[in-house]
Amino acid sequence: MDLKDKQQAKREAQMAQASRDELVELIARALREDGTVEPLKGLHLHRSSSPKEPLHSVWEPVFCVIAQGSKEVFLSNERYLYDPSHYLLVTAELPLVGHVFDASKERPYLSLRLELDPTLVGSVMVEVGDGVFSDTGDVAPQNHADVRAINVSSLDAGLLDAVVRLVRLLDTPTEAPFLAPLITREIVYRLWMGEHGDRLRYIAALSGYTPHIVKAIERLHKDFDQPLRIDGIARELGMSVSGFHHHFKAVTAMSPLQFQKRLRLQEARRLMLGEGLDAASAGYRVGYDEASHFNREYKKLFGLPPIRDVERLREAAGKSAGPVG
């Protein structure tokens, strides 16, 4: 690298740091106490002044950026770590475990989560074109070597600048309704043009086996309390049972049965915490006929039997009802 390139790289690094500093200031000013707010439709800000217990929840398609602190997210046994230099992209409804571990009163964890609307994502993809679409109107098949519906990528200067401009609109509420949709569209465009833009295809339910897996995920979310008939789902999707298993796990890192178990157990936990159901009733509601079977699987996932786990959660400070970015 010659002197000119080094100077350019130094300027870019300084500009990126200035953007990160501004993002910290903007979020801290908008959210002076720990918690989560949604100041603009689809934009969620989060603040935490201490590390939190791992949180099990189902995430919808989102783009997440950390202004300050660090977080890890687990999909099954796979770990995704991100910080102010990286963003997290989730492109399908997945049962994830999120853990904020780098936070303090002096340097609170500050982050944002932007919902990714399938209609908007599809619209941007149509406009970008560039050989993406086939003659039938579907997205042309791409390289499926890595089709996981979650990933961490480097946060480049252009994408970071768009994020800062979006959050900056909180200071100009009269302009926000007009400019926020435009900047959100720019963010989707920059994600699409980034190194892992192909994952946005999952949101628009396009290309290769992706629409089949999207449909299967939707089906499992809808009928999670019903017996799982793999052969029937595979037949409906026009896939072999082995092919369905392979492609489902490629996207979600879990087998369909493991995916269903996660959904069932997370919903049972919510029912006990939010609606006061006892363990047997919650287990039955989500599809378990035997209380002992439910208790075993619950303890395997959450580390404690249902009643003890719920008691611990109720006593824990800073309990959250949903995912944070």
Image (tube, rainbow, N blue to C red):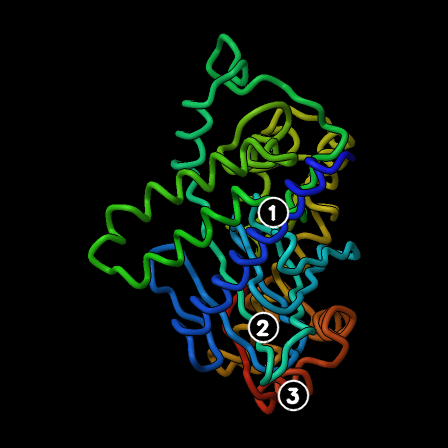
Residue 232 visible in the current orientation: no
Q: Residue at x 53, y 80 (%)?
A: 273
How many other residues sit within 10 Å of disc 3, few (<14), some (14-19) or many (≥20)? few
Q: Earlier in the sequence, mark 2 or mark 3?
A: 2
Q: Name the residue tied to disc 3.
A: 312
Q: Quadrant of the N terminus?
A: top right
Q: Earlier in the sequence, mark 2 or mark 1?
A: 1
Mark 3 lies on a secondary structure that is: helix
Q: Earlier in the sequence, mark 3 or mark 1?
A: 1
Please determine whether, in this image, residue 199 is positioned above or below residue 139: below
Q: Nearer the viewer, residue 195 or 288?
A: 195
Q: Nearer the viewer, residue 280 or 169?
A: 169
Query: Image quadrant of residue 182?
Result: top left
Name the side, left or right, on which 144 lies relative to 163. right
At label 1, the amino acid type is Arg
Q: Nearer the viewer, mark 2 or mark 1?
A: 1
Q: Nearer the viewer, residue 116 or 260?
A: 116
Picture disc at residue 195: none
Please determine whether, in this image, residue 136 is positioned above or below residue 42: above
Residue 306: x %, y % from top left = 67, 80
| Mark 3 touches mark 1? (CB < 8 Å) | no
Q: Quadrant of the C terminus?
A: bottom right
Q: Name the residue tied to disc 1.
A: 11
| Mark 2 touches mark 3? (CB < 8 Å) | no
Q: Nearer the viewer, mark 3 or mark 1?
A: 1
At label 3, the amino acid type is Arg
How many other residues sit within 10 Å of disc 1, few (<14), some (14-19) or many (≥20)? few
Q: CA distance from mark 2 to mark 3?
A: 23 Å
Q: Name the residue tied to disc 2.
A: 109
Residue 185: x %, y % from top left = 40, 39
